[in-house]
Image (spheres, rainbow, N blue to C red):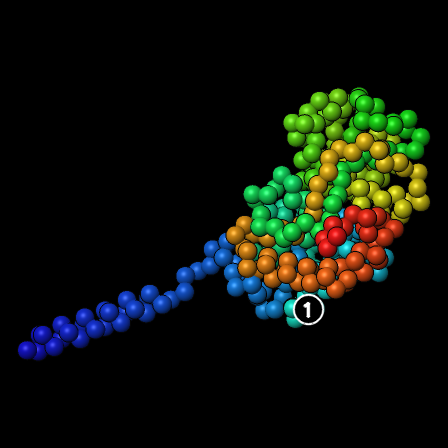
Amino acid sequence: MKKRVFACLMATVMVAGLAACGTKEAPKTDDQQNANGTVDDGKFVVGFDAEFPPYGYKDDSGEYVGFDLDLAAEVCDRLGWELVKQPIEWDAKDMELEAGTIDCIWNGFTINGREDFYTWTVPYVDNSQVFVVADDSGITSKADLAGVVVGVQKGSSALAALEDSANEALKASFGSMNQYADYNTAFMDLEAGAIDALAMDIGVANYHISQRGGGFTVLEEQLATEQYGVGFLRGNTALKDVVEETLLEMAEDGTFMEIAEKYADFGMTESVCLGK
């Protein structure tokens, strides 16, 4: 009798133990981060290239500013989140996102060609990749790039466009191609004549030309056209949906365009596509 009672007690303990294990929450995988559409500790960490004006950059006072950061700040204000602006090395963006050190990549981030690698919001900017040359370079078309030195940023959409099969012949015509960590360094080399042309986003090109008081020309022939979106970890649709819905509300009530107008000198009001 005692043995049967003891056996029953042990069975009860084992069942209780199994039940407890069954209710324990499994560790989050990378694609489950922010799965409920919220952010850890109320902080929304935006990864961005701090040298990519007018979308994200450091101003003269040392503050991180820009069109995309202004959009992110408005989203956070409406959702009651704290915005954390996290500068990243652009060619390390995937590592940062997968490690969970940032919640999204929001910084003139091109959707085209990356559709299957991230979870995207709807596009909010129509962009193009162009070539910038010095006014006195004598280069007026893509055909004139044959035999010259062309600069491009590492991990950029311009580099991706140049490595696309559609531009294989164009790239092969270059004398050489230099890759840079940032556009400030690339523009200094363009000014110094160390490179003859620079492939980059048109908005960033307009900003740098304006800041330098002119002296450069954007070739009319574009390298590629594309759209920008906010990129989240693949599968993180819940957080994406919350941010996207807030952006659409901003477009609906006019706040999105008000922010774009702050950067009208760089063609932002013509480039934005959300709500149009």
* Residue 194, percent from left and from top: 84, 31
Asked if 110 appears above or below 27 in the picture, the reply is above
Q: Position of residue 25 (x, y in %)?
A: 41, 65
Identify the residue at horizontal 90%, vertical 37% (top origin): 216
User: 235 or 5, which is in the foreground?
Assistant: 235
Residue 236 occupies quadrant: bottom right
Residue found 66% across the figure and 30% down from its top:
164
Identified at 15% across, 74% down, the residue is 8
* 139 vs 71: above or below: above
Q: Please state, as top left, top right, bottom left or bottom right, where the N terminus lies in the image.
A: bottom left
How many other residues sit within 10 Å of disc 1, few (<14), some (14-19) or many (≥20)?
few
Q: Residue at x 55, y 59 (%)?
A: 238
Residue bearing the label numbered 1: 78
The percent position of residue 235, horizontal first and vertical second, equals 52, 52
> Residue 155: where, in percent of width, then height?
67, 40
Residue type marked 1: Arg
Q: Is residue 164 visible?
A: yes
72 or 103: nearer the viewer? 72
